[in-house]
Image (cartoon, helix red, strand yellow):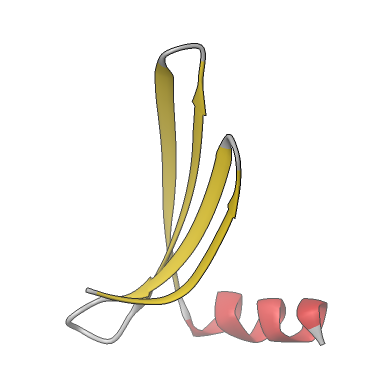
Amino acid sequence: METIFLSEHSPKTMEIERTDEGKLRLIISLSKLGQNTILEYFLDDNDVDALKKALA
């Protein structure tokens, strides 16, 4: 996987990766009080288009 975006604001991290199959994967993680919580989302074309509009 290739990381194409990384934003770290301790204790939170957000990454966007491109998988070997070309899909985008959004990973949000929180490390607090000795606990790590990781959420991952595989983004389809509709998600990508909606994010582009939201961030434009």
Q: In this view, does 14 lie to the left or right of 39?
A: right
Direction left: furthest residue: 20
Q: Where is residue 29 in the image (x, y as percent from the top left)?
A: 48, 41
Q: Between 45 and 10, which is closer to the camera in this rendering? A: 10
The residue shown at (42%, 13%) is 34
The residue shown at (58%, 74%) is 47
Q: Position of residue 42 (x, y in %)?
A: 40, 64
As displayed, is residue 27 above or below residue 11?
below
Q: Between 35 and 46, which is closer to the camera in this rendering? A: 35
As displayed, is residue 36 above or below residue 44?
above
Q: Quadrant of residue 25?
A: bottom left
Q: In which quarter of the image is residue 35?
A: top left
Q: Where is residue 31 in the image (x, y as percent from the top left)?
A: 48, 28
As displayed, is residue 38 above or below residue 40?
above
Q: In this view, does 54 lie to the left or right of 32?
A: right
As displayed, is residue 9 above or below residue 3?
above
Direction top: furthest residue: 33
| Total count of labels | 0
Q: In this view, does 54 lie to the left or right of 20?
A: right
Quadrant of the drawing holding the C terminus: bottom right
Quadrant of the drawing holding the N terminus: bottom left
The residue shown at (19%, 83%) is 21
